[in-house]
Image (tube, grey):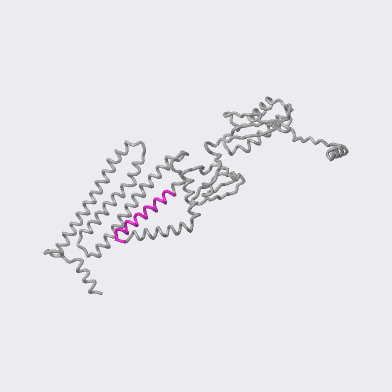
């Protein structure tokens, strides 16, 4: 064992040429230091140029994105250049082949990590800038709820790319690895097709955005509730009776629903009522409109409207339409308008008739006579 260590050390410090070992290594170390000093000065020069000229060029743009990107990227550019200098300096030294492979491998991994961090920080700064500019913009190109998912997806993609680059550098067969991952992904996809369908539908909901968190929607089954969360697998809806309805995303993507919060949060109320035949229709419409206007939360623009809809079996059918500022106010204001209509009808002597059915009863003897006539 001692002889092996001694031979390794001798090979490590064996002089190349006619110079003595001390002079030889002094020259080699000096050359490596010169390479390192050159890249260190290059890093300082590039940082200085980016700080001076880059910020001047960024001042001509309308946003502060360029300034923010420069602040995040400049330190990593400096580290990358210095690490590249260390890498080349190590390669210039006449060290043992195994030691060169180990050191260069470690430095290459470090440089790949720096590049990975640089790209990730630039992407993260871009997302932060986008979030800051779209906080109050409901028509944003990308839903703000997708930002964390996009950030995690980008990190996984960068990590996978960095791993493939490192494996390729160390001459591993990455194509067999990619093939194995593809076969494994296919097997997982077949085993979890329902889960993947819900995840893809979740991305579709976040991109297409038929509804947003906080919107009130009505499902095809009649359930009404406010959207609480849009996840990768399911969407959570809080119903009006404070229950949590959890629906798989694939079901929401393949069904029809009503978004009561789109295009705006205003809601239209409708009250159908019947008045007795012989009532003054114009007077009834005036009372309906005035009753709606007495309620404070009913909008004046658009104004309430009353219509004579149809002739019923026992009543003249009327309809009142009115608007409220938010759909959450519709139920309570409908109650207020209904109460006022009853009160005003009573004050003006307008009757709301009960359903009437007229039944004519014939004497039993007459029915027997008619039956005998039919038999003859």
Position of residue 224 measured from the top left corner of the image (x, y, whole percent): 59, 44
* Quadrant including the C terminus: top right
Locate residue 300 relative to residue 135 in the image: left or right.
right
Tell me which residue sits at (74%, 26%) in the image: 278
Locate residue 193 relative to residue 310 in the image: left or right.
left
**How many marks overall?**
0
Whether residue 270 is situated above or below residue 31 in the rendered picture? above
> Where are the magenta residues, as a range?
149-172
* Residue situated in front as seen by the camera: 13 or 147: 147
Q: Quadrant of residue 327?
A: top right
* Quadrant including the N terminus: bottom left
Tell me which residue sits at (45%, 58%) in the image: 188
* Residue situated in front as seen by the camera: 248 or 147: 248
| Secondary structure mostly seen in the magenta stretch | helix
Locate residue 178 relative to residue 39 in the image: left or right.
right
Whether residue 4 is situated above or below residue 214 in the rendered picture? below
Residue 363 sits inside the magenta stretch = no
Position of residue 366 measured from the top left corner of the image (x, y, whole percent): 87, 37
Residue 160 sits inside the magenta stretch = yes
Position of residue 212 measured from the top left corner of the image (x, y, whole percent): 51, 43
Position of residue 48 measured from the top left corner of the image (x, y, whole percent): 26, 44
């Amino acid at each position: 064992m001692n002889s092996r260590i001694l031979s390794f050390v001798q090979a490590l410090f064996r002089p190349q040429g006619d110079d003595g070992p001390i002079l030889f290594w002094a020259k080699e170390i000096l050359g490596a230091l010169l390479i390192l000093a050159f890249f260190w000065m290059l890093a300082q020069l590039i940082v200085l140029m980016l700080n001076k000229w880059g910020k001047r060029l960024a001042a001509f743009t309308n946003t502060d994105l360029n300034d923010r990107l420069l602040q995040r990227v400049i330190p990593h550019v400096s580290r990358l250049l210095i690490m590249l200098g260390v890498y080349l300096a190590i390669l210039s030294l006449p060290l043992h082949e195994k030691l060169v492979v180990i050191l260069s491998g470690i430095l290459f991994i470090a440089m790949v990590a720096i590049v990975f961090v640089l790209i990730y920080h630039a992407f993260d700064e871009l997302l932060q800038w986008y979030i800051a500019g779209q906080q109050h913009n409901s028509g944003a190109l990308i839903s703000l709820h997708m930002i964390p998912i996009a950030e995690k997806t980008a990190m996984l993609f960068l990590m996978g790319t960095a791993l493939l680059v490192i494996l390729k550098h160390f001459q591993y067969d990455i194509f067999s690895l990619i093939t194995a991952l593809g076969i494994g992904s296919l097997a997982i996809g077949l085993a979890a097709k329902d889960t993947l369908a819900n995840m893809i539908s979740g991305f579709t909901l976040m991109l297409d955005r038929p509804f947003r968190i906080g919107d009130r929607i009505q499902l095809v089954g009649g359930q009404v509730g406010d959207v609480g969360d849009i996840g990768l697998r399911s969407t959570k809806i809080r119903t009006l009776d404070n229950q949590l309805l959890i629906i798989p995303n694939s079901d929401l993507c393949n069904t029809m629903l009503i978004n009561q919060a789109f295009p705006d949060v205003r809601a239209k109320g409708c009250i159908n009522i019947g008045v007795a035949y012989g009532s003054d229709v114009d007077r009834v419409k005036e009372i309906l409109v005035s009753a709606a206007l007495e309620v404070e939360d009913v909008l004046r623009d658009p104004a309430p409207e009353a219509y004579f809809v149809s002739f019923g079996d026992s009543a003249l059918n009327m309809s009142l339409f009115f608007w409220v500022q938010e759909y959450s106010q519709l139920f309570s204001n409908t109650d207020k308008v209904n109460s006022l209509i009853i009160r005003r009808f009573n004050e003006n002597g307008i009757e709301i008739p009960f359903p009437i059915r007229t039944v004519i009863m014939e004497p039993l003897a007459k029915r027997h006579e008619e039956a005998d006539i039919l038999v003859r």
